[in-house]
Image: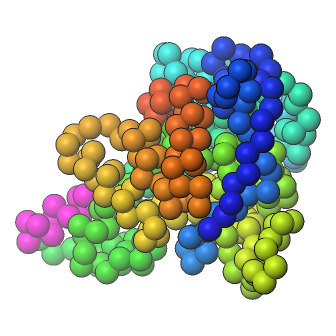
Amino acid sequence: MRGVRLIEEIARAGPARIGVVGGVAGLALLLVLELAVGPSAIIPVLRYTWPDRDVLGGSVAGAAAPTVAGLRSAFSGAGYDLDGVRDNGEPVPRLRLPSLPRDLPDIGDAGARKSVFLKLALPLVLEVNSRIAGQRRRLQQVARRIEAGDALSPELQRWLSGLARDYRVPEDRIDVLLRRVDVVPPSLALAQAAAESGWGTSRFALEGNAVFGQWTTAGGRGLVPLERPQGRNYKVRAFDRLIDSFSAYVMNLNTHRAYREFRARREEMRRAGKPLDGYALAGTLLAYSEQGQDYVDMLHTIMRVNELAPLDRARLGDVAIEYFDDA
């Protein structure tokens, strides 16, 4: 498990929609940059597969490496604005981004920096959720066929076996598999991405695409925390691509035993026919940090001050902003 040290920073004025983590007398709590997550080292990394390009509506960018200025220009060209997403349900462009802009920490205004981070992180959360939602729909169809006593085709049986293997569930336990194959509300994913990466400015996020600070063992590929306790050999897992960090984060919540309460609460919401509530689900993540309730309170503050709840209704559009060939 990790320790989270908080520092106070005077809140700078930013866009009305992009706040800072609230505090007393105008102070904002920001995460220090050296962060790591504990109970996740055994979760396998599955390389994310992008959808076929022919289903997309075109590309509006194409550069070797992202910069803040380049991203802002691409977002503007795609008509992508968070207020429009929140208020009018405007679509979010797909974003094929190899890594965070290295100049993100150079943005002096905290509100502007957070705006850029949320705008680049939201499409990645939605991308991973879109794939999982498709898996869930197909799994529900399989469950209905099994319940009706219909035999599965060999192709469908192979698909079910692979899905069960990925989610670490016996393939005959469709009930457990349905509990795991489900999305994470964007509001929660964005809050954790912001908290764990210092709004995209941590060394782990910038050098290893490690937005969520997941651990790996000594033999795994990763970055050594500067303040790792003596005698410990963990690292913060590094990823070749930014999207894989988001995919691994969702898989972590969906499979690790530490987050059984998260999955059970999410299933309760599904059974009640209610939208997934990221704010409520954050309350189940006491085990995500040794800070316990303080960590949950921090997530709640980030979600509330930055108005993340409306982004749970966000949807991907057909336009893709591409920064590299990821075939």
In the image, 277 versus 182, the foreground residue is: 277
- State the image quarter where residue 306 is shown: top right
Residue name at image x 36 percent, y 59 percent? 261
Most common secondary structure along the magenta stretch: helix
Left-right relation of 163 to 317? left
Which residue lies at the image location 87% right of the left edge and 39% below the top edge?
A: 105
**Stretch in magenta:** 138-149
Q: Position of residue 120 (x, y in %)?
A: 69, 38
Residue at 71% of width from left, 36% of height from top? 29
Quarter placement of the C terminus: bottom right
Image coordinates of residue 292 in percent, x first then y, are 53, 55
78 or 195, nearer to the observer:
195
Residue 288 appears in the picture as rendered:
yes
The verdict on residue 291 being magenta is no
Q: Quadrant of the N terminus?
A: bottom right
Q: Position of residue 36 (x, y in %)?
A: 70, 62
Residue located 80% across and 26% down the image = 10
Is 145 magenta? The answer is yes
Q: Residue lying furthest front in this view?
A: 25
**121 vs 326: above or below:** above
Taking 86 as reference, is 2 above or below it? below
Picture coordinates of residue 177, whole percent (x, y): 32, 67
Colouring used for the render: rainbow
Front in this rendered view, residue 10 or 160: 10
Q: Quadrant of residue 165?
A: bottom left
In the image, 35 versus 129, the foreground residue is 35
- When the figure is inspected, residue 214 is found, relative to residue 198, above or below; the finding is below
From where the camera sits, is residue 326 visible? no
